[in-house]
Image (cartoon, coloured by chain):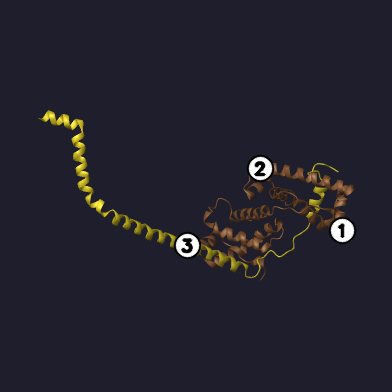
Amino acid sequence: MPDDAAPPLDLAGCLERVRQRDQAAARELVDHLYPLVIRIVRSHLPRRVAEEDLAQEVFMKMFTRLAQYQGAVPFPHWVSRIAVTTCIDHLRAQKRRPEFRWADLSENEASVLDAVMTNENEVAANDAMASHELVHKLLAQLKPDDQLVLRLLDLEQKTIAEIAALTGWNQSLIKVRAFRARRKLRKLFQELQKKERS
Amino acid sequence: MSTNLNDPRHPWARLTSAARTVRDDRDASAPYGFATRIAALALAQESRVASLLERFAFRAVGVAALLALGSVALNYQEITTTGSVAYAEEEFLQADDAVTIVLDLAAD
């Protein structure tokens, strides 16, 4: 039987049963929310942290704080916020950020970066994966909060309001962080261009 | 090179545009046994916290009862004599009270 045929989970009922310490309901809840949590974890995964460990931490926090959930926002949104804040906490814990060096790039990544900095053509479709890696390496140069804002804005194309809902930060703060992050990234591109020329 | 990162000609805009086309084909379903492990851990953690609280609460009640009994035992003599001391203090105060003296004189 295909998964699509599975009946939708009665989230409210499931939460009620979890509150009554029903282990089967807790399992159902984890299975239901896992794709959402793992997607967030994978897109914000800090270095040297296993995605399953981080997902486990998110779910443990979810269960610990379940009594605080008042239903003001949909439950998946509430869990998304826990996932995002858990990732950002891990990113903040990693004080050292790897230096971005041409020498550390793969041949393909270096040629893609060289191409986008020297001409104005679109990146070729078969270089999408290299671009993806480059974007993540460039973002890793920024502070964790700045990384998060740019990743959500430029990669996931979320709106300021969506980011505010996801992070709990106010919209002005997000705009300031985006501005600051872009300024740093611009500087980084200028340095890369100089290094390349030299 | 354009200096505005939002400019579609800027390298950043072109890189992110290409990066967005990469699809994440990794399996997003929970690994086998993951949900069972999390559910067991979460519910065990809750009961551990509850039993810890209960244990501390019962201990606190016991310690409070012992302290109360101890303080009664230590001050037993004081408690039993408090009545007579209070009466003596009242008489002493009345004797010193100017109003009482004046009233007493007036009565005489």
In the image, are marks 1 and 3 on the same chain? no
Q: Give whichever of A141, A42 is nearer the camera.
A: A141
Q: Nearer the viewer, mark 1 or mark 3?
A: 3
Residue at 76 percent across and 42 percent down: it is A183
Mark toward the start of the polypeptide (2 vs 1): 1
**Residue A84 figure quarter:** bottom right
Q: Secondary structure at mark 1?
A: helix
User: Looking at the picture, which amino acid does disc 1 mark?
Assistant: Glu
Real-space CA distance between mark 1 and mark 3, rounded to the nearest whole angstrom: 58 Å
Residue bearing mark 2: A173
Image disc number at residue B52: 3
Mark 1 lies on residue: A107
Give the distance between the C-alpha atoms of the residues marked 3 and 2, in whole angstroms.
Answer: 41 Å
Q: Classify 10 Å Cα crowding around label 2: few (below 14), some (14-19), many (20 and above).
A: few
Q: Residue at x 17, y 31 (%)?
A: B101
Q: Which of labels 3 and 2 is toward the front? A: 3
Q: Where does the image place residue A70, in percent across and percent down from the top left?
A: 53, 52
Color used for chain A? Answer: brown
Q: Is residue B13 left or right of residue A24?
A: right
The colour applied to the residues of chain B in this rendering is: yellow
Verify CB contact (< 8 Å) between mark 1 and mark 3: no
**Residue A101, percent across and down?**
82, 53
